[in-house]
Amino acid sequence: MIKNNSKRDFIKKMGLGLAGLFLFNIFNFRKAKSNYKPKIVIIGGGIGGASCLRYLSDYSKFIELSVIEKNKEIQTCPFSNLVIGGMKSHKDIVFKTKSFYKKNINYVNDYVKNIDAEKKKIIFDNKSFLNYDFLILSPGISFKWEKISGLIKNDPKILPHSWDGDKNLYSFKKRMDDLEDNSTIIISSPDYPYRCPPAPYERASLMANYLIKKQKKFKILILDSKDSFTKKKLFINEWNLFYKNKLEWIGRSDGGQVTEIDTRNKIVKTKNGQHYKGDLIHIIPDQKASDLFFQSKLITSDWCSVNPINFELNGFKDIYVLGDSIDAWDMPKSAFSANSQSKALSQNLVNKILEKEYINPAFLNTCYSFSAPERAFSISSWYRLNSDKTRIVSLGTTESDLNASNYQRKKETIEAYGWYESLTKEIYG
């Protein structure tokens, strides 16, 4: 275990330390050999892309910086479960992309059809294009709909997955509000790796809390493609305290992996042949990198393989990827991870342009989860590169106390809100 003061020191080094490096290098930009302004283009305005934009915007007088985002508003995945649970309003997690309109930054609100890596060209749906010298990709994830027989994308007969920032939380909540008493809700949790590992269990907890407040009688059944999950002991302890006989988890070995769905009859079938009938079915599909990578023939496997020093996509010069689309070894797919990765990527890209030595990056991930409105808990991990600098490895992990007091849970609730406000203000404010 790593003590909390080490965590604070690490955050200072990752935050203020890199900020200092950035400010120092701004003054060194004038020493570049040419007056040519390198064209850096960022695709994706979520946490990863917006974080890169924030850090690179300090150099906007010396580089030609563009950001491409297809949506006019960004709905963050962090805190979306709090909207489902009635703890936050939808407007609290939505940010206008007009914040990208800044001096010396070119903002393009359009859909990218594909990328021509050989010609260094980004092609839009309307066949117009944008050239780049360096490309940063943070477009998120896509889904393996084919993994569950009978599962159809955007099927109105089941709950929306609400896992990719689409504004379908209204529909999700309405379906919960329309539930009759003694209803059964089935949640199918995906296999690793996927975006935000603890989120299915937080969602189940906050759905249960919401329905109790609505004085509904219900049962939530989590059918899992895994035999364990992040913060398992913490979640199960919370469920036993607050949702006993209302929330049940079935792991893969006990028949939890869903392989088939009959949406007409509201039945799911698991790998061991069991059938479960639910009044409301919520499938969170298995995941892979954004479709943009496959459309552009940049990858053939599920996730992007990158150089852990600078996040350059293996096999493609001057294309960089961060966030949920990459295989980040020991690092999970989370907003905190993406923000941490963005600092290292941005700094080392600047160092490349300046022909300076790469920094040896360090990373942090802290993930807060809620079981109820004033009950949050967290897990934090620290990361460095291994000795031969070929992968990101964990240095250690600290987790909230299993038997924490109500005061401690409330304290972490305040910390979670503070983290979210600080992050979103920094990159979207």
Image (cartoon, helix red, strand yellow):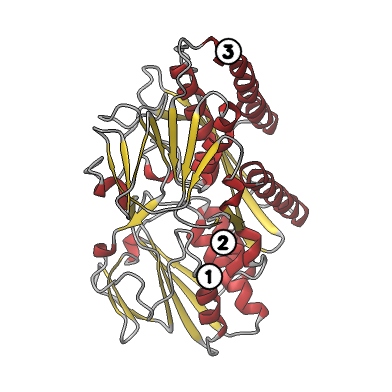
Residue 3 locus on image (x, y percent): 66, 31
Q: What residue type is disc 2 on?
A: Ser
Q: Which residue is mark 1?
A: 169
Mark 2 and mark 1 residues within 8 Å of each other at the beta carbon = yes
Q: Amino acid at mark 1?
A: Leu
The residue that label 2 is drawn on is: 80
Query: Is label 1 in contact with label 3 (beta carbons under 8 Å)?
Result: no
In space, the residues marked 2 and 1 are separated at their CA atoms by 8 Å
Q: CA distance from mark 1 to mark 3?
A: 47 Å
What residue is at 52 percent from the left and 57 percent from the top?
72
Taking 392 as reference, is 77 above or below it? below
Residue 130: which quarter of the image? top left
Q: Which residue is mark 3?
A: 28
Separation of marks 3 and 2 at Cα, in angstroms: 41 Å
Q: Nearer the viewer, mark 1 or mark 3?
A: 3
Residue closest to the far right:
407
Check disc 3 and report its element: helix, strand or loop: helix
